[in-house]
Image: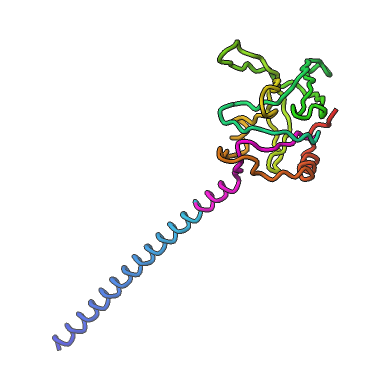
Amino acid sequence: MFHVEHSKSYRKKLSCGNLLTLSADKGELLLDALFRSSLLLIGLLFGTLAWCSTQSRLIAGWVEWVILEPWELTLKGKLDTGAKTSSLHAVDIEYFKRDGQDWVRFKTFNPRHKSKTLTVERPLLRDVKIKRHTAAHQERPVVTLDVCLGNRMINAEFSLIDRGRFNYPVLLGRRLLQQEKILVDASTTYTLDLDPRRCKALAKSLQPSNPN
């Protein structure tokens, strides 16, 4: 009798032990599955963020066509990571007052097509000193302008300078490139599509300053 009861008690303890062990094993498997799922979700999240970051970037050649809006003037632009501030070819620069504020009047054109001269008036943002290696520092007026690049409308600061001796009337500097997340491929030129009608529509939607 004692032997039978002892065997039953032993089997009962053994069964409970097995159940506890089985439960612990299942718990470990569940935790492992949750851990792996978490790693997978984290990987997918970072992958999605990286993909979105790449998609928002624009890869351009070191020379591209740009359109100065809202005047619809198409010019060649050099994308220069060595220059901090963008610049635009400008001549006959005049300072004047309008409603008590400082303004700038200037003329710009494509040096190869001088008949397409454009007179522009813009509020003066500031004057900037430009360091030159072989001459004294030069002061240039800075204004904000809208340019269309790769069917993307960009509002940025431009210093005004006579670029008649350069090949490109527009220089897009590092500040603009960083602002718009533009990567420059130095091995290519004119890689971006530029649709004047789309640029015009974008200019209207953003309601830039009216041309004089």
Q: Nearer the viewer, residue 103 or 194?
A: 194
User: Where's the C terminus, which quadrant?
Assistant: top right
Magenta stretch: includes residue 65? yes
Identify the residue shown where x is 38% and y is 66%: 30
Identify the residue shown where x is 78% and y is 16%: 94
Q: Residue 54 location, x and y as percent?
A: 56, 47
Say whether residue 43 is left or right of residue 155. Answer: left
Name which quarter of the figure residue 26 lies in: bottom left
Magenta stretch: includes residue 98? no
Tell me if residue 167 can be seen.
yes
Q: Nearer the viewer, residue 39 or 10?
A: 39
Q: Residue 87 location, x and y as percent?
A: 67, 26
> Which span of residues is magenta-colored?
47-70
Q: Residue 55 location, x and y as percent?
A: 59, 48
In this view, 184 is above or below 107: below
Q: Residue furthest front?
A: 112
Name which quarter of the figure residue 167 lies in: top right
